[in-house]
Amino acid sequence: MSHADSFIHISDNTHTLNPTHVCYVCLFQSTCLNIFSKNIPPYPGPNRMRDCYCTVNLDQEEVFRTKIIEKSLCPFYGEDFYCEIPRSFRHLSFYIFDRDVFRRDSSIGKVAVKKEDLQKYHGKDTWFQLQPVSADSEVQGKVHLELRLSEVITDSGVINHKLATRVLECQGLPIVNGQCDPYAAVSLLGPSRSEAKKTKVKRKTNNPQFEEVFYFEKIILCSYQVDLWNASNLKFGDEFLGGVRVPLRVLSQAGVHDAWYFLQPRENGGKSVKVEELGSLRLNIVYTEDHVFPSEHYTPLRDLLLHSANVAPVSASPAHTLGEVCREKQEAAIPLVRLFLHYGKIVPFISTIAHAEVNRTQDPNTIFRGNSLTSKCIDETMKLAGMHYLQVTLKPIIDEICTEHKSCEIDPVKLKESENLETNRENLRQYVDRIFNTITTSGVRCPTVMCDIFFSLRESAATRFQVDQDVRYTAVSSFIFLRFFAPAILSPNLFHLRPHHPDPATSRTLTLISKTIQTLGSLAKSKSANFKESYMAAFYDYFNEQKYADAVKNFLDLISTSGKWDQRSIETPIMLKEGFMIKRAQGRNRFGMKNFKKRWFRLTNHEFTYHKTKGESALCSIPIENILAVERLEEESFKMKNMFQVIQPERALYIQANNCVEARDWIDILTKVSQCNRKRLSTYHPSAYLNGHWLCCKFSADTASGCTPCTGGLPANIQLDVDGDRETERIYSLFSTYMTKLIKMQEACGSKSVYDGPEQEEYSSFVIDDPQETYKTLKLIVSAVQTLEQQHTKYKRDKFKKTKIGSQEHPIGDKSFQCYIRQQSESSTYSI
């Protein structure tokens, strides 16, 4: 897995049947990016500057849009984007758009990175030239064709050849201007092109079923051309959707060819534009790919890892060893935390490694200040388990600050002529006061898993440094304030508190607030000395009162006391997500029509509502406690993509999101807020109830129990959707990547066991407290990793042998599969 800088995290989740093991292997891919563009061509007018934004697309489906950077030809977006992608894709594309004074958007250029090329740019800052955007190159989807060549003997005894061409169906065609009414045009290409024969137009579908046959006679060696078009009512004519050229030499001796093809762009269809004139785009892409096996394959490695808290000393445990061999501690922390959270073992693991780190610390003022495995694991745990807590606590006030745009600059050097220093100080003081009070009164909502971790930190620090009475507080505040609340205030977009990076003025306000909150939470003896800037030290005089220190200590005492808090305390409604989607009428009126309508949806921590438009009163309100499950709805139900269902006691609400990423986001957040409901379902119907029966199981009773297990049901306090096998696969990949370091660590254990003198320099980077115990662990890790390596090799070999190019899963023209073939060491024949 992976992450980025304007970050995109993409995960393509597909399942491949492996008959040898009679099991499923899941493929997960993820990407993250940083986006910056330069040398955008100037606007052809006196202003010359442009207002640009960038979109991120999977093929032609937009999944993310940056904010608009105004009046710039070198816009820096600096936005983070993370998403799980529930389908395969061929290109990861980036489009730069310009919005003019009439709010019309026009494309400037694009960058399209092939899926198989993503690995080439892994972890590198790379500049890409923007390419022209042409309708003829914006293609996606695939087509299923069948060709049959037969001989016909005429009455005069002459043998003629007759070609029967059958266009069966297409899948995943692009939607043009909100609609897709496709038809296919078929022709033969030879010395002269035959007249095109056309299928019927299929209305309102991007997955048309044609099932039409065309016949061609007088065949000379040539090619067969199929072009897909969108029937348009516009005066500009029909839009090209993609095409395929099939040489007739593919016909076998039997004279039959049946295959799927990826649609390709039309050659020389675009306008001739000098690429250098369009500017360029800088991307930082991190791309990884994991093949996840069934759970039993990971049992040896997983059991080793989950036993880490019981290994003495903990430095000899497999989890700690992973932190030792990885280049960055963060690499190890991410999958370890997710794995331990999933199996409910995160508290004992972090408690054990934190206790060991505290015992190695000599000065209480430096406790947990380094980038150790302990610090990174606690950071990741807070980010995952505390995300909802952060939303409920900070989002309302952060939204207000970003909306009000009050001036809070207190640096006299940066003050504008129209601003008043005292007014700005008062604005900033009010914001700091409100955020401080919000944080210090939120202890009862702190997730139990975080409270239990803070309790162990406090106890370890207080036991180690018994003379220092404040260490029990600073051990906890160094995380909750320094690494949780302060960074979230500073960069709210990174913590999903805001959709985009704030504008420069608001960002400056948040920086000043973050600095002050961080200092208030640190309980440092000399607060003014914490600031390099004299204006910050002067501003902090407002808060030099004992009541602030007392409030911090009371808050830290509350969140570092082990035990569960009543999560049902009365809370102010917090808006978590909102936006337009399409819903199907629920049929609450007996004679009402169950049609589809566009509505404004709004989710708070109390209820899920929809409205005719934004700002109007709710047409329907569903209390959170009435949500029994939130699951995807199969496409066959209404022939519509990106649908999901919110299941209530009496009925299900069917909703269509704007794209696959948005559907996933809504499902995730609705599942999280309803996770603690006591009556949550364990099974559901993946298809709709239509025409008197469930489409999935064919039961006629609309009250019939579900036929498929629900995907939710995780512990409410953690509110995290984790695949334990996927995390174990990631850990295996890390061990495999750093195998040379594992071997070197084994050598270091041997060296320490037989040589008791000064440590050799090449082994000094490893923490080895018990060489014999560490060597045993390393031996078990290497054995488990080698076993998994053999299973991966066998799976790839078997998949290679059984894959058929031209099948629906691997259409002809898929360059990523051709690349896969070239990468295999074994040569094998394959069939079309």
Image (cartoon, grey):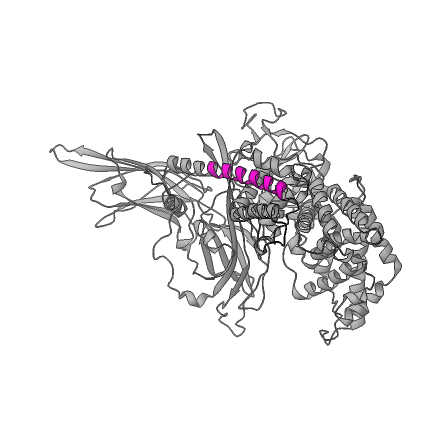
Along the viewing direction, whichever of 333 and 710 lies nearer the viewer? 333
> Does residue 264 belong to the magenta stretch?
no
Q: Quadrant of residue 631?
A: top right
Toward the viewer: 481 or 16?
A: 481
Whether 798 is drawn above or below 277: the answer is above
Q: Residue at x 74, y 75 (%)?
A: 418
Q: Residue at x 73, y 46 (%)?
A: 355
Report if residue 619 is visible in the image: no
Q: Is residue 205 left or right of residue 397?
A: left
User: Residue 317: horizontal and vertical position, in percent?
Assistant: 64, 41
Residue in the foreground of this view, choosing between 518 and 300: 300
Which residue range is magenta in the image? Answer: 771-790
Q: Position of residue 774 (x, y in %)?
A: 62, 42
Closest to the observer, 392 or 144: 392
Residue 54 figure quarter: bottom right
Q: Position of residue 762 (x, y in %)?
A: 56, 54
The furthest residue to the left:
156
Q: Residue at x 40, y 43 (%)?
A: 142
Q: Is residue 274 above or below residue 320?
A: below
Can see residue 401? yes
Marks counted in the figure total: 0
Q: Is residue 82 left or right of residue 793?
A: right
Q: Magenta region's main secondary structure? A: helix
Q: Quadrant of the C terminus?
A: top left
Looking at the image, residue 249 sits to the left or right of residue 357; the answer is left
Where residue 288 sits: x, y (%)?
Answer: 51, 48
Q: Name the residue: 66% across, 61% down.
A: 502
- Residue extending furthest right? 546
